[in-house]
Image (spheres, rainbow, N blue to C red):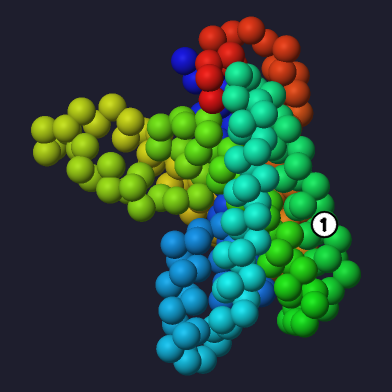
Amino acid sequence: MEGPLPPLLVGMTFVTGLVDGFSYLVLGHVFVANMTGNVVLLGFALAGAPGFSITASLTAIASFVIGAVIGGQLGSRFAAHRARLLRTAAIVQGAFLAVSVILAALSDAPVSGGWRYGLILSLAVAMGIQNATARKLAVADLTTTVLTLTITGIAADSTILGGKGSKAGRRLVAVAAMLLGAVTGAALVVHARIAFPLVLALIVIAGVAAVTAALASSDAEWATAKA
């Protein structure tokens, strides 16, 4: 039983596209959510490729780890109730996103110096919390940040190849959500104000927090199943 968790996690996958679109375009070739890609970018920077920063990549990785630790602590504390876990994690994540919105609104484009690293730190912590929470909730094919295995599953489990293909719809929705987030985030950065992708991300996470807060007293099987 997963109840409302899948659509909520799809919304958080959309947030990943938004913030990584923002971070890559505005903060100088760095990801704050997809750490696999960020490690690759760190490799480019170590090799001396122009346009990549060792310090920025390391800051994102370290901050993401801090966020994952926070998310892990919340997961342990609210392990008995998935709705309360997601509610609390979304509230904490939202606080860091709110900080990033303020920083982006106050900074000039292109973002540099302390503004840049403040944004990397706050966003990477927020996404580390999200990733750790999604991992604890363990809803199949909805990690909210990593799509490599999701795309692999679409192909490998295809009914054409004799697989079950039972989760192809959910997997495609997850891919589409991140793609839509990236497109939206990039469009807002290029054609509007750089803070707008983060404002939209904050709105989505606030919505997740509101929905799960309303369900926090639920004794439904999906909510009380051990996270």
- According to the image, label 1 marks what residue? 99
The structure residue drawn at horizontal position 43% and vertical position 47%, both measured from the top left corner, is 175
- Provide residue 204's location: percent of width, then percent of height: 70, 41
Residue 49 is left or right of residue 61, and the answer is: left
Up the image or down, 65 lies above or below 169; here it is below
Residue 122, picture quadrant: bottom right
Q: Specify whether residue 21 is in view.
A: no
Task: Name the residue rendered at 65%, 38% in the picture.
Answer: 73
Q: How many marks?
A: 1
Which corner quadrant of the image does residue 184 belong to?
Answer: bottom right
Using the image, determine if residue 87 lies above or below residue 223.
below
- The percent position of residue 65, horizontal first and vertical second, equals 59, 56
In this orientation, which residue lies closer to the viewer: 186 or 124?
A: 124
- The answer, for residue 178, to whether it is visible in the render is yes
Residue 215 placement, left or right of 13:
right
Q: Is residue 61 toward the left or the right of residue 195 in the image?
A: left
Q: Look at label 1 and name its amino acid.
A: Val
Q: Residue at x 50, y 50 (%)?
A: 145
Point out residue 167 in the picture as x, y percentages from the top left corner.
Answer: 33, 31
What is the residue that sits farthest to the right in this orientation?
106
Q: Secondary structure at mark 1?
A: helix
Q: Is residue 126 above or below residue 141?
A: below
Asked whether, in this view, residue 110 is left or right of residue 73, the answer is right
Task: Tell me if residue 122 comes above or below residue 40 in the rendering.
Answer: above
The quarter of the picture where the C terminus appears is top right
Q: Residues within 10 Å of mark 1 (few under 14, many from 20)?
A: some
Place of residue 35 in the rendered image (x, y in percent of width and height, measured from the top left) = 50, 61
Which residue shows up at 45% across the image and 66% down it?
37
